[in-house]
Amino acid sequence: MLNTPYYLLDLEKLKHNLCSMRNAFERLWPNFKIGYSFKTNNLPWLISWFRAQGVYAEVVSTPEYQLAQFTGYDNDHIILNGPHKGNETLLKVIKDGGIVNLDSFEEIRFLMDNLEETKNAKVGLRINFDLEKECPNETITGEEPGRFGFNIENGDFEKAVGILKRCQSIKITGIHGHHSTRTKSLKIFSSITNAICKAAQNIENLEYIDLGGCIFGDKPGAPSFDEYAETITGVMKKHNISQDVTLIMEPGAALVASPFSYVCKVITTKDIKGTRLVFTDGSKKHIAPQMNNISFAYNLPEMNNRQTINRQIISGYSCIEMDRFIDIKEEGELLKDDIIEIMNCGAYTISLAPLFIEYFPQVVVKNNEELITVREAWGLKEFLQKNIIIK
Ligand SMILES: *Cc1c(COP(=O)(O)O)cnc(C)c1O
């Protein structure tokens, strides 16, 4: 039973994205692994699907780590990143043979204080460097410093390597370099790979290089998986990185943005100041939770013989004025009960949607012609979990 609004996952598209990314990289670097970024879309069904495809889990908190365990990821298929891992989780992933990329001196200090528990521990270090200087106007922070990892220019990275090298029971085995950027350009990936390879020069036990995520997937006109793979492995080869070293990528949006759409229904219309306002049972909160101005691709119903309206604004159920998400000109008239499908809604939507006015919508997976509900819509019962009220 489909009740609008709902998210719709086209499984064919998801399979295609994963397969084309794997092929592009494995062709050039056979020792290649994907860690799926849970935060990008943490739908439990999706996370368990990636596990079944042999993809690793990329998690950045204790709850995400617990979700990886619950959905059946092997201990050594978990990559733990981020500034707030939780000490217990940090130790557990290290002891269980997972991948941990350290982010701060506090984490190193914690490991040093627990040396009896960290015998033969392997850790990676996340690097922080002035990417904006190499790629002007391309980063999110611009002239402001990035927050994550050990900075190279101020000597923190070298200091961290020094501390860990003096400690016999912990080995540095990886370098991590995720950066979020506005452009996701090939130049960005050339710079990051170069910085990682330079940082890896003095690491004797190098087992992996982890480029992080923030790449495009199948977006028309954007760099392709093949181009990213050529750029990254090209720089690795120039630095004589051994083919035994595992190349890790941590995509989120590149895999999951395009396979999801969002389906809502027209509930009523009004004409005010020469503009047709079209109300739906959906909300911008579900497709752009940060209420940024994205120009959505969308599908409207067949418009055979309907009159043309010069301007229609498609809007949502919430009581927020700016809950408007599509502004269309010279289209057929939208009528009550028409279905509207908004495309490319899989990244930073389901995981960021709020419990505002209405609750989480249903999620449906389309596998060939079969439709499976993988999350029922939340109602009052789910909203009230763990709350008390006065009777
Ligand atoms: C967010 C994040 C990713 C994934 O980013 P996308 O833009 O969704 O590809 C990968 N790695 C880390 C460490 C992240 O924080």
Image (cartoon, helix red, strand yellow):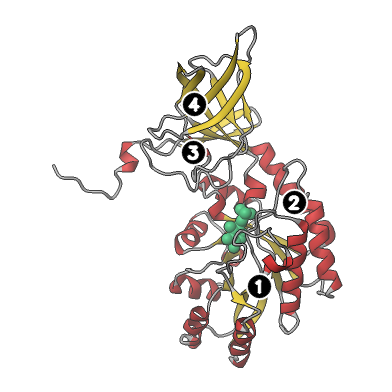
Q: State the residue at coordinates (60%, 67%).
A: 76
Queried on whether the Cβ of the residue with tag 4 lies below 8 angstroms from ligand 1, the answer reads no
Say whether residue 221 is left or right of residue 88. right
Q: Which mark is residue 129?
A: 1
- Farthest residue toward the left? 391
Query: The C terminus is located in which quarter?
Result: top left
CA–CA distance in space, label 2 to label 4 = 32 Å
Name the kind of residue labelled 4 in the image.
Leu
CA–CA distance in space, label 3 to label 4 = 17 Å
* Between marks 1 and 2 in the image, the one whose residue lies nearer the viewer: 1
Going from N to C along the chain, the mark reached first, 3 or 4, is 4
Residue 339 position (above or below residue 15):
above
Name the kind of residue labelled 3 in the image.
His
Q: Which mark is residue 286?
A: 3
Q: Quadrant of ligand 1?
A: bottom right
CA–CA distance in space, label 1 to label 2 = 27 Å
Name the kind of residue labelled 1 in the image.
Phe
* Between marks 2 and 3 in the image, the one whose residue lies nearer the viewer: 3
Q: Residues within 10 Å of mark 3 (few under 14, many from 20)?
A: many
Q: Residues within 10 Å of mark 4 (few under 14, many from 20)?
A: few
Going from N to C along the chain, the mark reached first, 4 or 1, is 4
Residue 240 position (above or below residue 230):
below
Q: State the residue at coordinates (57%, 46%).
A: 46
> Quick check: can you spot residue 97?
no
Q: Which residue is mark 4?
A: 2
Name the kind of residue labelled 2 in the image.
Met
